Amino acid sequence: MKALWQLWRLPFRQMAVGAVLLQLAWLAGAVLLGCVPATDASLAGVAAMLFAFGAWFWFTLLGMCLRGLCRPESFLLPGFRQRLARMGALQVAQWVLLPTLAALVLGVPHALLGGAGLLLLAAIGLAASSARYISLVVWGVFMLAGWQPGLAGAAVKVLIASAWAVPLALLLAVLVASLGLRPLLRIEDRETDSSPLENAQLGRARARNLDGTPARRGKLGQRTGAIFDGTSQRAMEQALARYRAKPGWHLRTVLVRRLLLPHDNPQAIALRLLMVAAIVTFYVVAVMHRQRFNAAVVGAYAILLGLARFPQLGRGMRQMRPNLADLYLTLAPPTRTDYQQTLLDALVVLVPITVLSTVAYTGLGIVLTHAAEPARMLLAGAIVSVGASLTALAVHLVGPESGFGRGVVDVVVTVGAMAVYWGGYWLLGALGLTIGGGLLLLVTLGFGLGVWSSARREYLRRPPCFDAPLAG
């Protein structure tokens, strides 16, 4: 019982606030289901929504915990699989069996179908956190439903009225759960860790367990990662060959850049833009083609995507501190300031990369949405991204050490950049592209360069730090 209790408490240890909120959602659903009459369909529907929401996210949280728990050494524990099975049975009893039995006793319509649906949602949540292709399939189903809402609604009505709905949902739940549990229960080598400075849009740097260890990836993720790793390897070999042929300050900076930013070489940037373009195009064509919205939103979203690179830079530079000691010894700089300057010269390339990405995403959005004022959107996005990327790079290099402080800085910079974009977009419309663009460039570039100059002086003043970051 002690092991079972510890397993049940695992979500509370990993994400205490989320686990408590989900358990409160279950309790609220149980109270509503037990206190309202069976004829009150509205309150019974609210209870069903609470159970459905809670089951989906609770089992998603369980899957995230299991990703870190199911390591090869864990299977050496006596009765590990049996205890996992008992814990799973306990969770299914709480989230599926008890609400279903209560609904049957109270005479709630479609109680069995609701219980089968709860089990299916729980299985999808569990599988989506371990087998990422399940998430893609679910995302695709929802997109198709948004593409043809009338057909989706008719299909749901037919399923509800069919006698095969309950067994079909149960079989599908068993299939999805088995697909999600199979990679977790398979004993295999741990995934190779990725660079902390790897671009977040590649997805691999975010694919981590709650304890920070690399998560297992599927075949598609492994092949995609291998392609990007191949580009970084070729870029490193080319930079090393050029440096050996003609050593110099510039080529040394390029070599350090290839080491610190492995997936920010030209080939990887082009591949990343193509991947994002394919996903965005599919989403807009499949889902957003029926909806009317202001095309200028595309520029704000492009800035948001571009700035998403810098929070990871701040976290990655802190995680890499012990490893940067080797780089310091290899470079053997005359002074500490020379070493800090080398890092700044290597990392400042993220500014033009961000501007290029923002302009590319904005251009793609203009084509897909048939924007009425493409030049206005492109000019506003390009100008704002220059100042915003300089500011983001500066504050994440010398910003706060704590996770909370970095989160606040990230929110302030992102919200501020999007607000400046909307203000600049209005300014270009009011004063024209030439006068408005010049004024916007003067304000944003002046602010960005001012923040960057101050942060640069502070970064050069600080001594190199090679201590492992504190937790948080």
Image (tube, helix red, strand yellow):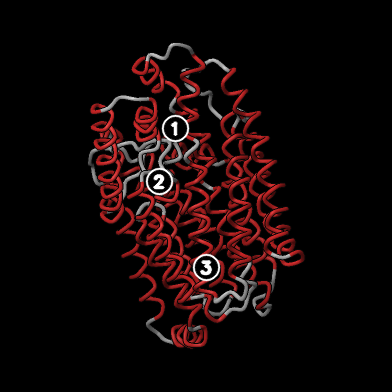
Q: 325 left or right of 471?
A: left
**What amino acid is found at the position of numbered circle 2 in the picture?**
Ala
Q: Dot 1 corresponds to which residue? A: 346
Which mark lies nearer to you, 1 or 2?
1
Q: Residue at x 65, y 69 (%)?
A: 46
Q: Residue 193: horizontal and vertical position, in percent?
A: 33, 36
Q: Which residue is drawn at 58% across and 76% down?
A: 108
Which mark identifies residue 409? none
Residue receiving disc 2: 207
Foreground of the two, 274 or 403: 274
| 1 or 2: tag closer to the N-terminus | 2
Mark 3 touching mark 2, by CB under 8 A?
Answer: no
Percent of width and height locating residue 138: 42, 67
Which secondary structure, mark 1?
helix
In the rendered image, which residue does mark 3 sit on?
365
Q: Quadrant of the N terminus?
A: top left
Identify the element where label 2 is drawn.
Answer: loop
Q: Which of marks 3 and 2 is in front?
A: 3
What residue is at 46 percent from the left and 19 percent from the top? 339
Nearest the viewer among 368 and 338 is: 338
Give the residue at x 46% y 27%: 343
Relative height, residue 262 to residue 368 (above, below): above
Image side of residue 73 versus residue 7, left or right: left
- Residue 20: percent from the left, percent from the top? 61, 46
